[in-house]
Image: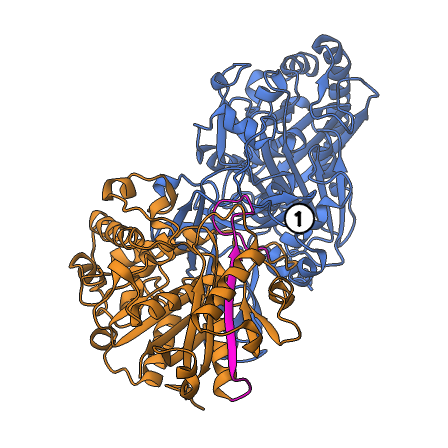
Chain colours: A blue, B orange
């Protein structure tokens, strides 16, 4: 059973196909490149120790679906860092976003182009189908290497389908596939390798140009009609080469977010698109191109609804909400590159499949219950009301988007965690209800009673290979 | 519907208690045998005379066989009980009821815990119930540390004052433990050491936490009218109360983490059973569940020893010290006697046994009338609470 209702029946307002909603997510921590052994300017984003591609996809998906009446019929989840090599990663995203059971979910993997490709595939859907495209990546490079400093962690989500209030029409999409040894990583390898840049550039620029020209043709546009072009590539020279060969002006190029986020794998193209939509005017024509194992190009045109349908957090807002002082050693520990001495506490137990299944909407979607007799919120959902004792008289009640405050808190130096100390709080929701949980993205010295919180989907820990996802509260971002 | 109690119907006629601490050379079965035989000797009886046993342990074993096998009790009923950190008191309570109802003539309540074999820091519960992975990961000191800032805020105490009060509690219990040959820590600790100790959770440092230890304790009980067959100075049970709360402190915004409603309820029940009207006046001494220093502070109010918001002042005034008007934890408490879970409730009773017999050495409380033991299991907002009142006839 799922909470999102089927799409409303069409009224007489004309519908069109395109991006109905979108959202993005950039984790809280940044690594200054000057603090990393490979050096460089600016900073990269770093998923926290309790985040992974799945949890970040959920955060971006929540942004896209907040207050949205559309229920996706498809969920496409693109990443090069899926939490499980075998097990549908999209299923946890599906559960956390409380999507209808009949929605088809599928993972797209192994190439940073898969995020933009998923958006292109979604744009080809017909009729009443609505696809949620989530792209999310935690990019881990070998220590001291350019992929480590140049990579970033982020997520984005696009709801694609027909509706009366489309944010942006997808005007054209095209692809080129190249069997090319550019970036590769075997199943047992921790870090990807990359071929020499100049050779790859020579092969990918023509592919990019071809994809861009095909998509422009489909859109009935020429290169100079484009308001903005976002180029997603690990080879920076590719952008300037493309500009020359495709006849693009420097003013058309969008910020590649290299200085603030880093290239966020399969999420990066979508992150660039979301960033452009955040400030787009109606009628703006935006091209996003991605070069990896070939090329992908998508052209969208912003509609009159672009300003009213923006997500709560813009990409710029996420980027501005940060902690820049993450020590490099802490980062290496979080990624389990540096071994760390575990606290002298038992390893957390592997969660069990049947209880997880029984409490699926609580564990994944943070759906509690509310008493029909007295209105009290019950977290987790109860059969007998915690307030008035009524039995089996509850409505399910979502709390994932509920705002809350710190009722009381403590800093726990003893609890098992990859990042000690653990900050735990008793959280009072503004809509009623109380829950005790860990705080995420928090400075232990700056927690205060009354501090405003919001809920965030996290991976609490991994035990015997099982990713244990649940919710924490974080200071409002 | 009533809690009628068994006032004056059951007596403790013998007790035993091992030293608490790091018993690297002894396992749970060794500790059980030691406590059981000491209790039998103290009652002047053989173990064959014991008709039934109640055995309490949280994590050190399962079933009555944990006792029957090492002690060679033959073919006797042995019930294993568990109720978090109140396990030892729960063994006593159930044993007392068995005697009171006439099912047996002579029974033993015994509790044990072997915590130091785990290699972990702090208390670790071994219960491996499969879960959905959403349970709180807060450790015991973290959950109890929530009391301190909430109490300070409610009663307008500055953090320094509160720290001073908590330090005073730790100092007192360490000083008491220094007079106790069976305590885990038999050393007074200066205030500076307490306040500069490494932090464990919130404002709690290492010296704000009870000792993690191994140990066992046992009591032999019979009907009060038979008590003088075994003992010249039996300890008579006036009240036994056990309350399991609704565990809703982390579910209802009404709870403010400055008290334990479960303790208030169990104290009211016990006082009604014992006919106590004013605990501050009538309870001569108490052994309470000082698992962490703020717990003892709050308990003074929940048990009615101090008015609400006044326990910190009473603490600073020395009311709860051995020479004070109402000594609390004269044996050193969980703080310095140590806290082997299943044994602790019976260890509290062991101090009552010694005190009422005048055998408490240089920590002896003068002519006690009524004694109280209080044992807590769980955490603020989610706990079980036990209160007993004992005395002599």
Q: Quadrant of the C terminus of chain B?
A: bottom left
In screen coordinates, is A273 left or right of A170? left
Toward the bottom, the furthest residue is B1
Give the number of marks.
1
Toward the right, the furthest residue is A179
- From the top left corner, tell me how far across and down residue A131 is, in percent: 71, 48
The answer to whether residue A376 shows anywhere in this view is no
Would residue B87 be counted in the magenta stretch? no
Q: Which residues are magenta?
A: B102-126
In screen coordinates, is A233 left or right of A88? left
What main secondary structure does the magenta stretch of the protein show?
loop
Chain ID, mark 1: A
Up the image or down, B390 lies above or below A102; here it is below
Report crowding for label 1: few under 14, some 14 to 19, many 20 or more residues within 10 A (C-alpha). Answer: many
- Of A427 and A113, nearer the camera is A427
Residue at 44% from the left image edge and 55% from the top image edge:
A403
Q: Secondary structure at mark 1?
A: helix
Toward the top, the furthest residue is A198
Q: Quadrant of the N terminus of chain B?
A: bottom left
Residue at 34% from the left image edge and 77% from the top image edge:
B233
- From the top left corner, tell me how far across and down residue B51 is, in percent: 57, 79
- Of A341 and A390, nearer the camera is A341
The answer to whether residue A17 shows anywhere in this view is yes
Up the image or down, B354 lies above or below A285; here it is below
- Of A328 and A97, nearer the camera is A328
Residue at 51% from the left image edge and 68% from the top image edge:
B110
- From the top left corner, tell me how far across and down residue A451 is, in percent: 36, 50
- Of B64 and B264, nearer the camera is B64
**Picture quadrant where residue B16 is located:** bottom left
- From the top left corner, tell me how far across and down residue A245 is, in percent: 70, 13
- Give the labeled residue for mark 1: A93
């Amino acid at each position: 059973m799922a909470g999102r209702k089927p799409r409303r029946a069409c009224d007489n307002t004309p519908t069109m196909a395109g991006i109905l909603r979108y959202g993005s997510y950039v984790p809280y921590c940044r690594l200054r490149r000057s603090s990393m052994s490979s050096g460089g300017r600016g900073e990269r984003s770093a998923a926290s120790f309790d985040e992974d591609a799945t949890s970040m996809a959920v955060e971006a998906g929540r942004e896209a679906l907040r207050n949205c009446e559309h229920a996706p019929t498809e969920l496409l989840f693109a990443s090069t860092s899926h939490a499980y090599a075998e097990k549908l990663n999209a299923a946890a995203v599906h559960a956390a976003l409380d999507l209808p059971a009949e929605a088809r979910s599928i993972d797209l993997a192994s190439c940073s182009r898969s995020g933009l490709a998923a958006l292109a595939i979604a744009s080809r859907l017909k009729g009443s189908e609505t696809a949620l495209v989530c792209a999310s990546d935690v990019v881990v490079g070998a220590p001291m290497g350019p992929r480590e400093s140049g990579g970033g962690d982020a997520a984005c989500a696009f709801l694609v389908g027909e509706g009366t209030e489309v944010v942006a029409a997808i005007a054209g999409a095209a692809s080129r596939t190249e069997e090319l040894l550019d970036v590769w990583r075997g199943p047992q390898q921790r870090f990807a390798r990359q071929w020499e840049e100049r050779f790859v550039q020579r092969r990918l620029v023509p592919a990019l140009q071809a994809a861009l020209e095909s998509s422009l043709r489909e859109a009935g546009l020429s290169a100079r009609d484009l308001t903005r072009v976002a180029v997603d590539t690990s080879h920076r020279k590719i952008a300037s080469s493309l500009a020359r060969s495709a006849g693009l002006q420097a003013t058309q190029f969008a910020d590649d977010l290299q200085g603030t986020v880093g290239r966020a794998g399969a999420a990066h193209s979508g992150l660039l698109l979301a960033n452009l939509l955040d400030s787009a005017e109606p009628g703006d024509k935006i091209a996003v191109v991605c070069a990896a194992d070939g090329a992908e190009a998508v052209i969208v045109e912003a509609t009159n609804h672009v300003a009213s349908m923006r997500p709560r957090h813009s990409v710029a807002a996420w980027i501005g909400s940060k902690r820049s002082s993450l020590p490099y050693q802490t980062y290496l520990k979080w990624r389990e590159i540096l071994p760390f001495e575990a606290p002298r506490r038992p390893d957390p137990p592997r969660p069990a499949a049947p209880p997880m299944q029984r409490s699926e909407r609580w564990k994944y979607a943070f759906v509690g219950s509310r008493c029909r007799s007295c209105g009290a919120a019950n977290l987790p959902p109860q059969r007998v009301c915690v307030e008035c004792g009524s039995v089996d008289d509850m409505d399910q009640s979502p709390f994932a988007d509920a705002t809350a405050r710190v009722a009381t808190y403590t800093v726990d130096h003893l609890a098992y965690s990859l990042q000690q100390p653990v900050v735990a709080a008793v959280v009072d929701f503004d809509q009623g209800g109380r829950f005790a949980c860990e705080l995420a993205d928090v400075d232990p010295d700056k927690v205060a009673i009354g501090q405003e919180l919001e809920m965030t989907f996290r991976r609490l820990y991994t035990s015997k290979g099982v990713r244990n996802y649940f919710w924490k509260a974080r200071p409002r971002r | 519907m009533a809690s009628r109690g068994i006032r004056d119907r059951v007596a403790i006629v013998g007790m035993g208690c091992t030293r608490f601490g790091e018993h690297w050379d002894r396992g749970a079965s060794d500790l059980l045998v030691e406590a059981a035989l000491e209790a039998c000797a103290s009652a002047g009886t053989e173990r064959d005379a014991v008709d039934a046993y109640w055995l309490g342990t949280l994590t050190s074993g399962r079933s009555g066989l944990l006792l029957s096998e090492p002690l060679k009790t033959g073919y006797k009923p042995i019930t294993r009980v568990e109720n978090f950190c109140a396990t030892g008191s729960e063994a006593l309570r159930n044993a007392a009821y068995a005697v009171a109802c006439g099912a047996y003539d002579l029974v033993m309540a015994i509790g044990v815990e072997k915590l130091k074999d785990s290699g972990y820091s702090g208390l670790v519960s071994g219960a491996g119930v499969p879960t959905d992975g959403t349970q709180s990961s807060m450790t015991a000191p973290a959950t109890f540390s929530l009391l301190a800032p909430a109490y300070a805020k409610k009663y307008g105490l500055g953090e320094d004052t509160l720290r001073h009060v908590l330090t005073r509690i730790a100092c007192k219990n360490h000083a008491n433990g220094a007079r106790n040959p069976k305590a885990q820590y038999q050393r007074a600790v200066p205030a500076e050491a307490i306040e500069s100790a490494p932090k464990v959770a919130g404002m709690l440092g290492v010296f704000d936490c009870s000792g993690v230890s191994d140990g066992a304790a046992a009591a032999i009980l019979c009907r009060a009218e038979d008590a003088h067959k075994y003992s010249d100075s039996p300890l008579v049970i006036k009240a036994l109360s056990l309350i399991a709360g609704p565990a809703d402190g982390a579910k209802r915004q009404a709870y403010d983490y400055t008290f334990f409603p479960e303790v208030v309820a169990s104290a009211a029940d016990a006082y009604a059973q014992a006919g106590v009207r004013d605990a501050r006046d009538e309870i001569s001494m108490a052994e309470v569940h000082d698992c962490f220093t703020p717990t003892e502070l709050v308990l003074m109010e929940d048990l009615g020893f101090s008015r609400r918001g006044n326990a910190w002042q009473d603490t600073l005034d020395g009311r709860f010290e051995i020479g004070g008007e109402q000594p609390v934890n004269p044996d050193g408490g969980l703080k310095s006697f140590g806290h082997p879970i299943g044994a602790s409730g019976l260890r509290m009773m062991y101090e009552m046994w010694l005190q009422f017999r005048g055998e408490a050495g240089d920590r002896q409380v003068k002519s006690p009338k009524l004694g109280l033991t209080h044992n807590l299991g769980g955490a603020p907002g989610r706990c079980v609470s036990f209160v007993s009142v004992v005395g002599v006839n």
